[in-house]
Amino acid sequence: MRPTSIAFNSSLHMVRVVFNFRSIIHMLLLNKLNTDRFRPVSWRHMVCSWDVFFQKRIFAHPRPFEGFLLRTVFFSRITSGRECNFRFLTRVNFNGSQITRCDISIGRRVPFCGGRLVFLNTRRTTFPFAFLAMSLEYTEIPVLDWTLAKRDAPAFISQLRNAMINVGFLYLSNHPVPMDLVNHVIDLTPKFFTLPQKVKNSVDMSLSPHFHGYLRVGGEARDGHPDTREQFNFGGDRVCRYVEGQPEYLKLHGNAPWPEDAALPGFRQTMLEFYKCLEDLSWEFTGYVSQALGLEAHELYSLFDSDRSKLQPRCKLMSYPPSPPGTTGIGSGIGPHPDKSILTYLLQASEQRVLEVQNHSGDWVPVPPIEGTFVINLGRALETATQKITKATIHRVLSPVKDPRYSIAFFSSLGMDIRIAEVKFEFPQEVLDMKKARDERTGDKTEFKYRDSDYRKAGEVVLDEKIKTHPMATLQFYPALFDKFFPNGLPAHLVAH
Ligand SMILES: O=C(O)CCC(=O)C(=O)O
Ligand SMILES: [Fe+2]
């Protein structure tokens, strides 16, 4: 337990001696109290443990500073880039020499971003008082104004770069999709999900070779855990390009099964109009994303097929049923995941604050609905194309407590003929430096590596995923692949269905 691993300023040498002595006493106490949770494994952890313990005691007191004469506060920087067993002191407001508020939270294993020890020099002694975790992490999602892109493109691009490299999520306000149309979509989405089950079943995904259509609650699973949401999946109006002898993934494109117009007047037309607007917005936005990465505006379009009419981004309406507190069996709406897309555009169509993203410290940051915005997040395809300059930020949706929660997502994805490992870009040093600074701050030392699937055509990879996730449609439309992926027939839960 020698403190040599921490670079103390020499002027704090005396402090260190006192600190060691008191720490050890407190550690002994601490170990006695709660050995499992706080047992120190290194000097660093000993400091942390001592601190948590000490602050708990101080702040439990209604007037914590009584009896102390605060003379000096010293700071000592702790080196960054290691892993810490737990995290604490999420918020400490230092107001001059007075601490005004302190929260302690003990988290799971998270990247340790660095921090400062605060030493208080009181009339009686000098002791380490607090450890300020300097996670330097975002706690809010940035809002970018689309009109800024038109007024001052360099300013917009600079904000976008920061949001892309350091956060991976952003809101886009003042976007060009007409608000009347957005409101119509918001109005129709719950109406679709409250249609009689018979109508929804008539457009079930199992009836679509393109994996479009309706999915009931639990109809899709992530890592074996079914999502608690209903969905309606569609693309634009597209003619299926598949002909005998061509790659089977060409079957992925085509029209969705839509409900009869009489069942929900205007539904199909409105959704397709919305889809078209998002196609245009995402196309234009991609040009800015390209520039934010230090590339020419057109360069990122090489992630798509050269013929734009061959693209069919996917769109889906989602309904998350409520899960009252105490209910068992229903977990989160959708568990933590990164998106596979290049970029995802999300319209939050109801008021619940259930969407959350995980920052580099492991904290869940809320992404509350903001009227008139889209939430845009960066997916795996972009992460791979940029060799991790951008990251596919993990996010999740909690089940709402009272009413259903609705959202609409538009996924802009790789062109089907693209092998992502073959697309190479030259990023400027300025952008590489920002990535390096982020990785240093967050302690991320992982090397970028292509996955096997990155060498395959994106269409093949997507088809495999769809096949694995939707055996019913596969059985119907891809019999040969069904036999390959499900040699033992339909999974048990579907036989019962
Ligand atoms: O519904 C949402 O807010 C997010 C949905 C989502 O993350 C997804 O479908 O990948
Ligand atoms: Fe997602």
Image (spheres, helix red, strand yellow):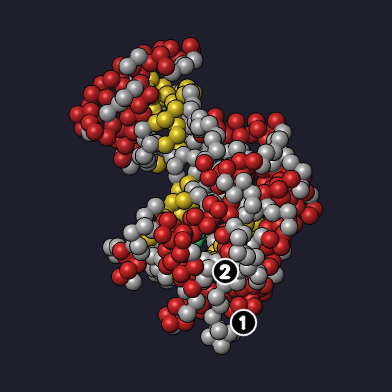
Amino acid type of disc 1?
Gly
Q: Which mark is residue 266?
A: 1
Q: Residue at x 44, y 42 (%)?
A: 362
Of callouts 2 and 1, the N-terminal one: 2
**x, y percent for residue 255:** 60, 71
Amino acid type of disc 2?
Phe
**x, y percent for residue 305:** 69, 54
Total marks drawn?
A: 2
User: Mark 2 or mark 1: which is in front?
Assistant: 2
| Residue farthest toward the bottom in the current orientation of the protein | 262
In whole angstroms, how far apart are the C-alphas of marks 2 and 1? 15 Å
Residue 42 visible to the viewer: yes
* Residue with the mark numbered 2: 234
**x, y percent for residue 387:** 60, 38
Cβ–Cβ under 8 Å for marks 2 and 1: no
Q: Residue at x 42, y 30 (%)?
A: 83
Give the image quarter of residue 112.
top left
**x, y percent for residue 331:** 35, 59
Q: Secondary structure under badge 2?
A: strand
- Left or right side of 155 for 356: left
Quadrant in which the C terminus is drawn: bottom left
Give the image quarter of residue 292.
top right
